[in-house]
Image (tube, rainbow, N blue to C red):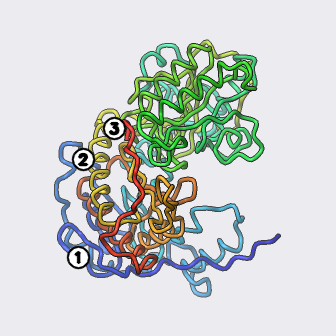
Amino acid sequence: MAVTESAPAVPPAARTQTRTPDGPAAGPPDEAGTGTHTPTIRDTPKIRDTPNRGPSDRGAPAQGVQDRGAPAQGVQDRAASAQGPSDQGGGGGYEGILRRQSLRESAARTYARSLPIVPVRARGLTIEGADGRRYLDCLSGAGTLALGHNHPVVLEAVKKVLDSGAPLHVLDLATPVKDAFTSELFATLPGELADNARIQFCGPAGTDAVEAALKLVRTATGRSGLLAFTGAYHGMTSGALDASGGATDVRVTRLPYPHSYRCPYGVGGARGAQLAASWTENLLDDPKSGVTTPAGMILEAVQGEGGVIPAPDDWMRRMRRITADRSIPLVVDEVQTGVGRTGAFWAVEHSGVVPDVMVLSKAIGGSLPLAVIVYRSELDAWEPGAHAGTFRGNQLAMAAGTATLAFVRENRLAERAGILGARILGQLRGLAAAHPCVGDVRGRGLMIGVELVDPDAAGPDDPVPPAAPALALAVQQECLARGLIVELGGRHSAVVRLLPPLTLTDEQATAVLDRFADALAAAERAHTPQLPAARRPTAPRTAPGPSH
């Protein structure tokens, strides 16, 4: 059946004042509280930012913060010129661009539906739209932008390659740029893996790296079955979808993933994780389970699209023991959790687990397309050409990735993400005490989720209230109206997700939380006007697991 769609709505003007560290700012949301001095367009036709400071002084007050609430001069003229001739006059400016996107692009597009903006410039945490409004970006390219938009070290690395005259397309040939990237990447890996590893450069998307990993373990073991987990997300290609939680034609054995808030066993915490691990072990050892020894197990150390669910460290270690004892390769998908996102350079480091295969993409390319798998050399049973891709030699992405990996490592941004993330989680949990619609706040490092629920709909036997996806969507829209970009995830798209860059400052974090708090209150008032402010759900909540 054909789908008829009208043009997406233009983001509304902010309905509340946007706070800055120096007080409310008049006018549309801008980059108030971003923590680094970014001149307005009246100063320069491009957003400029000073290089991000080291961890020790990120909390320092920003220069020129008091000026950021003022409307930029010439915004409309410069925005129009950035759009090109076809967008001026009869084209309707940025509204025309959105209208044409709605008419021309496929129904499969996603982010453009909930975020009807037209980015024209960006730096750090800030995106500027063609309409002149500025947004604090806590989506970060779905976790791709570890250093935010257009970080100076990334731009310099790309420029250096362009200016050198080096070839930009080389298939899988060896180049100095690739050699530097591989060396820097291996320097960040768990030592036990790096000392005996091989790397496969895949097609540019993370889902292709997942396909390569699954193909690799099947080739190496001669087996075909796979173990995956409920709630998983590994990409949109066929094999990756089979291993994801939304699969409909099941060709993979599905295992329970520990979830403290919505525990499949109704107990949560460490006990719930133990039961999940015991189920996995019994399934593999029961000769009548119908599950033969698989080619591999694939898991995420923190489920991202599944609703920001960190795996308990003890459970991770038990999965490693279960697979090692049965000669089952363990594949860990670090596409979104890698490069410092969770408070460690790689999320497996929290538990000390060393997998047999690591799937890496997103942030390793420094904002450009790059995907690889790194695996134990004993698994390297492929024939030449067994997995290939025309664009597996992306030189610009490798240069940008080398610069990003080095900057995160040298400036200890993973450690910084862990400290700041814990502080944000604490503040969000404090906010939850005043909002009955907040069912759970969870995450690790700067990978944070807020699950929204309907407390009135909980039955007497329900351990927790049901999810509230309509409310979550309203919160996302209210955030956008206040100049804050967030994403939704989880089983019912009821988890508001925050993935800010690792360069986030204390001041920026305060601005993000202020805008989120305002948006949450506005959406809650609109959706539950009859709900007393102090009322809490009567259903008991399970205690968070050890890794939360």
- The secondary element bearing badge 2 is classed as loop
User: For the residue labelled by badge 1, is the local secondary structure a helix, a strand or a loop?
Assistant: strand
**Distance of label 3 from label 2 (alpha carbons):** 15 Å
Q: Between 161 and 225, which is closer to the camera in this rendering?
A: 225
Q: Are marks 1 and 2 in contact (CB under 8 Å)?
A: no
Q: In the rendering, at what x and y percent does residue 236 appear? A: 67, 47
Whole-number angstrom distance, CA of label 1 to CA of label 3: 32 Å
Res 110 quadrant in image: bottom right
Q: Which residue is mark 3?
A: 414
Q: Is residue 285 left or right of residue 376?
A: right
Q: Nearer the viewer, residue 474 or 80?
A: 474
- Residue identifier under label 2: 53
Q: How many marks?
A: 3
Earlier in the chain: of badge 3 and badge 2, it is 2
* C-alpha span from label 1 to label 2: 26 Å
Which residue is at 70% across, 17% downward? 220
Type of amino acid under label 2 = Arg
Instruction: Report the amino acid beneath label 3.
Output: Ala
229 displayed left or right of 288 = left
Q: Vertically, is 318 above or below 501? A: above
Number of the label disc, if any, that sits on residue 24:
1
Upstream in the sequence, badge 1 or badge 3? 1
**1 or 2: tag closer to the N-terminus:** 1
